[in-house]
């Protein structure tokens, strides 16, 4: 890891910057699974004291990126299939709900913006994984935008930002061979949205998410059935 700048343009508190540096290093694969993270060594590399490193590791443990082991300290967590499937199932349920509510409501301007994100991803095939992660996130949020439920969109955005999901998703885009596949799948999703084809749109969402999340587990991921449509709220009498 690189030392934190002495005079940063980033004016976040030191503890937040240390946390972000450690989180990104784990997400980007700089540390191997089960690798021991020594607080004094990390502090020396970052150019900070032990205290913000200790606080950052405690926060990362709450988020599941590291694990406390008596006698060994903090170890980088290895993602299990259950970890991946848990995130996948929640994201699939939320995005499927958003797509069902958004289908048929995309404006020409929204469709043009989605198309632009696809073309930007296609043109940036050699960009770092972090760039593709962000373009991918923006594409999915833009596709869900017409659902009209701001809380739903914010919840999905928070899920995208969660360190475990960032680690899973980044591991997919780090393989350059997956970028053209993702672009092609995004084009199919856009075409289904343009045609307001709900059945095809929801089926493509399932296939797209399975393709991404299955990269990190040895066994196939099974898509759960999603049949729940919330009933309209009725005022109590």
Image (spheres, helix red, strand yellow):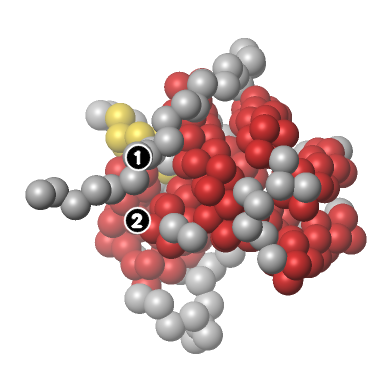
Out of 128 and 124, give the one closest to the viewer: 124
Above/below status of 173 relative to 5: above
Is any part of residue 222 visible from this angle? Answer: yes
Determine crowd level at label 2: few under 14, some 14-19, many 20+ residues with C-alpha closer than 10 A.
many
Out of 220 and 39, give the one closest to the viewer: 220
Above/below status of 99 relative to 108: above
Above/below status of 223 relative to 208: above
Mark 2 or mark 1: whose residue is earlier in sequence:
2
Secondary structure of the residue carrying numbered label 2: helix
Taking the spot 75% from the left edge, 62% from the top edge, the residue there is 111
Image coords of residue 200 (percent x, y): 72, 34
With 79 as the anchor, is 75 left or right in this view? left
Taking the spot 51% from the left edge, 21% from the top edge, the residue there is 225
With 69 as the anchor, is 45 left or right in this view? right
Position of the N terminus, as image quadrant, is bottom right
Q: Which mark is residue 56?
A: 2
Out of 182 and 25, give the one closest to the viewer: 182
Q: Which mark is residue 231?
A: 1
Is any part of residue 41 visible from this angle? Answer: no
Residue that extends furthest to the front in the rendered view of this protein: 237
Q: How many numbered marks are there?
A: 2
* CA distance for labels 2 and 1: 42 Å
With 132 as the anchor, is 102 left or right in this view? left
**Residue contact at pointers 2 and 1, CB within 8 angstroms:** no
Image coords of residue 217 (percent x, y): 60, 21
With 219 as the anchor, is 55 left or right in this view? left
- Residue 110, quarter of picture: bottom right
Out of 50 and 188, give the one closest to the viewer: 188
Residue that extends furthest to the top in the rendered view of this protein: 219
Taking the spot 43% from the left edge, 53% from the top edge, the residue there is 152
């Amino acid at each position: 890891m690189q030392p934190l700048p002495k005079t940063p343009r980033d004016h976040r508190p030191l503890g937040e910057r240390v946390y972000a540096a450690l989180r990104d290093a784990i997400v980007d694969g700089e540390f191997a699974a089960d690798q021991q993270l020594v607080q004094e060594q990390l502090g020396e590399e970052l150019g900070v004291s032990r205290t913000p490193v200790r606080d950052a590791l405690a926060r990362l443990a709450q988020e599941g990126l590291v694990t406390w082991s008596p006698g060994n300290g903090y170890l980088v967590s290895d993602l299990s299939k259950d970890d991946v499937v848990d995130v996948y199932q929640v994201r699939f349920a939320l995005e499927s709900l958003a797509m069902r509510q958004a289908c048929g409501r995309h404006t020409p301007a929204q469709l043009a913006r989605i198309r632009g994100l696809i073309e930007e991803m296609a043109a940036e095939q050699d960009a770092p994984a972090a760039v593709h992660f962000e373009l991918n996130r923006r594409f999915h949020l833009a596709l869900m935008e017409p659902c009209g439920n701001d809380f739903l969109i914010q919840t999905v955005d928070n899920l995208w930002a969660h360190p475990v999901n960032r680690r899973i998703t980044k591991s997919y885009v780090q393989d350059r061979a997956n970028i053209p596949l993702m672009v092609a799948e995004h084009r199919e999703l856009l075409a289904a949205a343009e045609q307001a084809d709900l059945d095809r749109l929801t089926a493509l969402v399932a296939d797209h998410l399975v393709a991404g999340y299955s990269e990190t587990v040895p066994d196939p991921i099974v898509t759960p059935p999603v049949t729940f449509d919330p009933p309209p709220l009725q005022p109590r009498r």
